[in-house]
Image (tube, grey):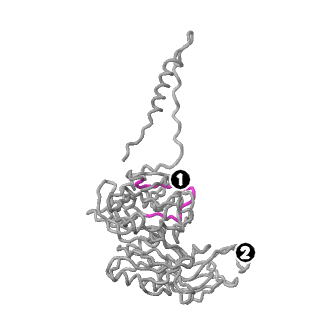
Amino acid sequence: MATPFRLRRPALAAGLLALALGTTALSALPGTAQTPPPLAAALPRPAGPDFADVAARVGPAVVQVLATERLRAAAESPAPPRGAPMEEMFRRFGGPGPQQGPRRAGQGSGFVIAPEGYIVTNAHVVGENAELRVRLADGREFPATLVGRDAPTDIALLKIEAGAPLPSLSFGDSDALRVGEWVMAMGNPFGLGGTVTAGIVSARGRQIGAGPYDDFIQTDASINPGNSGGPLFNAAGEVVGVNTAIFSPSGGNIGIGFAVPSRMVQQVVAQLREHGAVRRGWLGVSLQPVDQDLAAALNLPEPKGALVSAVQPGSPAARAGLRAGDVVTAVEGRSVATPRDLAAAVAELAPGRSATLRLLRDGAALERRVELGSHPASLAAAKPGGPAQPSLGLALAPRAEGGVTVTAVAPGSPAAERGLRAGDVVLRAGGREARAPRDVIEAVEAARAAGRPSIALQVEREGESRFIALPLRAA
């Protein structure tokens, strides 16, 4: 670490000022009585939160995550990911360390959620195919096993064997957070070790183009490279978020940081712990928002809900009788104001589960019961009795003209690293014609079962076709 630069000129100036004061102004004038200067009155401490007790209590459960990942050869360097608005200013901050030979060292933060050694961090901190270690607050260091990672929400779950119960943290209710409420961030900025910063909740429900399930807490608590994966606490010391990204032209803190809300983290972690991957429900519809003009044209009471613009043939929505023009207003009693609300609500439900949708059709209210399917983006299929395979980070949808359309690419995923982006059309996967998302999924599963390191995708973009070798990395 570089030696901190110390400012010496102000100290010298202060010394000269003290000398000047000692030789001039403090001398008494002739014929006047010298009176002692008045004592300075102690100012009252400004009102505000005191996180000292909270920090002392939760600090032992905040950890440093160290990842060492193989670098690709120069000829295999992927194209940069695209798609996020102002992506050069939105930065995931895992805090990469120096490169050493053929390996790259990275570091981030995490926190213990169970005494037996389960640790939550960010998916982009652990990377792909990395060797992981966890350094506890007391300085002990242990190898870590990746239980599972979920690229769409950027959450990963690790496990260490410490030989004794570890101090752990509990989750709070992120839905109860209010804008303006005080919060505290802890983590490992710039590799400095345990650091505490505080601020307020600046906004909720932020969408920054990071993935299909954006629902970030925005805070001005100072977070920087290396804080990624660390906890965001409320004043009671409960984890209400996982620090994940910052908005910054320079890469440093400017007071705009983002955390994944604890409600989402808990749901993802529970599935990672049980299955090693996240299983999301799928409806099979294309959606658009409802504006004032559409609300009037569709005889809706207000411009809210998710308008169904298309229903995929054979999908769960088609089997339940949904039609283009329906407006979904609620899922299992949960209000739907935008298409993103519907996508998030359905994704939180397990495939195979039945859900009740409230609709408006031609101005009339009705309900439909639908049995959800498996999301086509779930290219992470666990082998029976074996570890879950990581997601390739693709969301796919059928295409009437042939092939399947890429509808979303998860940041930091193998698909993003190979330059795939929304709007691309997959024509073939592993020598198999792609007529539906299931064709691509089955081709990937077959390639993995055969032990192949990658799968060849024939991709069409703007009328031109090319082949892309997509890595199939082990979990």
**Label 2 is placed on what type of residue?**
Asp
Q: Is residue 310 left or right of residue 144?
A: right
In the rendered image of this protein, does residue 208 appear above or below residue 381?
Answer: above
Q: Quadrant of the C terminus?
A: bottom left
Is residue 205 visible to the viewer in this orientation of the structure?
A: no
Residue at x 61%, y 73% (from the top left corner):
338
Q: Where does label 2 land, which residue?
A: 293
Element on which disc 2 rests: helix
Q: Quadrant of residue 106?
A: bottom left
- How far across and down, in percent of the image, does residue 173 sit? 49, 65
| Mark sitting earlier along the chain (1/2) | 1
- How far across and down, in percent of the image, does residue 121 sit? 40, 64
Q: Is residue 168 left or right of residue 421?
A: left
- How far across and down, in percent of the image, does residue 472 sit? 38, 76
- How far across and down, in percent of the image, does residue 71 sit? 36, 65
Q: Where does label 1 land, which residue?
A: 255
Give the extent of the magenta segment.
171-189
In the rendered image of this protein, does residue 266 appear above or below residue 379?
Answer: above
